[in-house]
Amino acid sequence: MATAGAIEPEVGIEPSPGAGPLQAVVWLSAARCTVTYVAGPALGSIGAVAALVGPVAVWLHLIATGCVWLGTRRMWRARRRGRVAYTALAVAVTFVSVVGIARALG
């Protein structure tokens, strides 16, 4: 018996197979942007800490790219409706990651 104000789960609603990888990409993107655009400039005056920002950003770019392509593969294998849009997101994340890695290394 449900209590007043309780939300009952809907029957037949399943999480999207691409939801997990998409959430991972969003969180990694937030972490990457924080490290690159907030922590980097804020800690730029501290030499030892600033030296870590580049390598951390490179690893975050690589992990985000891997997650987005794993999610893309899952979307296509499950033949999900949003797979073309998700693939476009994967291409955009890959482009941003390549540019970010080039900036971090160069």
Image (cartoon, grey):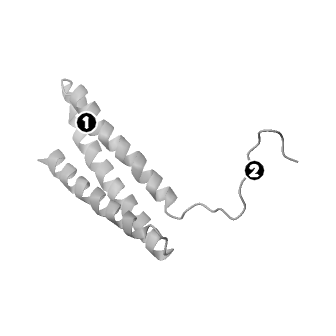
Q: Residue at x 42, y 69 (%)?
A: 83
Relative to 58, is 3 on the left or the right?
Answer: right
Relative to 80, is 98 on the left or the right?
Answer: left
Quarter of the figure with residue 5:
top right
Circle 1 residue: 37
Can I make out residue 43 in this image? no
CA separation, marks 2 and 1? 42 Å
Relative to 25, is 2 on the left or the right?
Answer: right
**Identity of the residue furthest to the front in this view:** 4
Can I make out residue 1 in this image? yes
User: In the rendered image of this protein, does residue 24 appear above or below residue 34?
Assistant: below
Label 1, residues with CA under 10 Å away: few <14, some 14-19, many ≥20: few
Q: Residue at x 41, y 49 (%)?
A: 26
**For numbered disc 1, what is the local secondary structure?**
helix
User: In the rendered image of this protein, does residue 84 appear above or below residue 101?
Assistant: below
User: In the rendered image of this protein, does residue 29 appear above or below residue 48?
Assistant: below
Circle 2 residue: 8
**Residue 21 in the image, given as x and y percentages of width and height:** 46, 58
Which of pointers 2 and 1 indicates the residue nearer the eye?
2
Between 82 and 76, which is closer to the camera in this rendering?
A: 82
Q: How many marks?
A: 2
Relative to 22, is 33 on the left or the right?
Answer: left
